[in-house]
Amino acid sequence: MAHAFRPLSRLVCIAWLLALWLPASALQAKEPMSQQQALRTLNHSDPQQRFEAMNRLAVIGTADAADAVLPRLHDKEPGLRNVALGTVWQMWGRTGDKEIDTLYGDGTAEMKEGNVLEAIRIFSDIITKRPAFAEAWNKRATLYFMVGQFELSMQDCEEVLKRVPKHFGALSGYAQMLAERDQPEKALDLMQRAVAVNPNMVNAERLMADLRRRIEIKRKQSV
């Protein structure tokens, strides 16, 4: 049995030598960034550092800090814009309150399963418990839209924008509903606000061009 300890003693010697010759940073595992550290790193000149900061925020970041990531939707690196988009959505859906975040997870799971009415019930419960949580309103707005309750959906979009004025999801969704109700002026204003925040939105320019055309037609008809 004594020979069984020989490999271990060699490892101890190697570790001891490494401790003498290598810098401490090479021996210690890198500590994960806190939310504040990640937020400070968002504007780092190194794209890799910005990438790591956003990845970290996607895991731990909360909705109250999501606005800090929005400028990265304009990042000069196209790939990082996509990372920023996913990070913002993850942060919007997290409050840091375990009970609320668990309920939110339940609601999104019901949405994915197509259980719309149950999902509406869950998000309504969240709204009652934590009305400041904008993403609960946004998810319920989406669900109301899915079941054809457009007035209720637009009302919830209003609630989202009271809490998060730069919520490009609510801005664009609300704009599309207004466009379908022949309110192109207000719809265009909302879409312009959405694109100012997130210039990467698919079909946004096409929708805005159509809205401008409709506004011009209405203007000519009123003369």
Image (cartoon, rainbow, N blue to C red):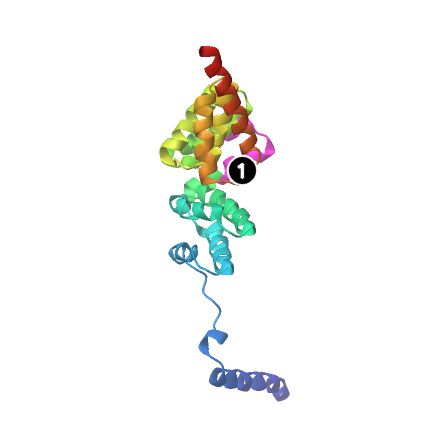
Give 27 or 161, whichever is nearer the viewer: 161
User: Which element carries disc 1, helix, strand or loop?
Assistant: loop
Percent of width and height locating residue 93? 46, 41
- The magenta-colored residue range is 105-119
For mark 1, what is the residue? 201
Percent of width and height locating residue 221? 48, 11
Percent of width and height locating residue 135? 44, 36
Left or right position of 151 against 78: left
Would residue 122 be seen by someone viewing this image from the given angle? no
Residue type pointed to by label 1: Met
Neighbour tally class for label 1: few under 14, some 14-19, many 20 plus, Cα within 10 Å: some
SS assignment for the magenta stretch, majority: helix
* Residue 109 among those drawn in magenta: yes
Please, is residue 215 above or below residue 111 in the view? above
Please, is residue 191 above or below residue 75 in the view? above
Percent of width and height locating residue 191? 47, 31
Would residue 12 be seen by someone viewing this image from the given angle? yes
Indicate the quadrant where residue 192 lies.
top left
Give 188 or 3, whichever is nearer the viewer: 188
* Residue 123 among those drawn in magenta: no
Q: At 55% across and 49% down in the image, what residue appears? A: 78
Viewport quadrant of the N terminus: bottom right
Viewport quadrant of the C terminus: top left
Please, is residue 112 above or below residue 156 in the view? below
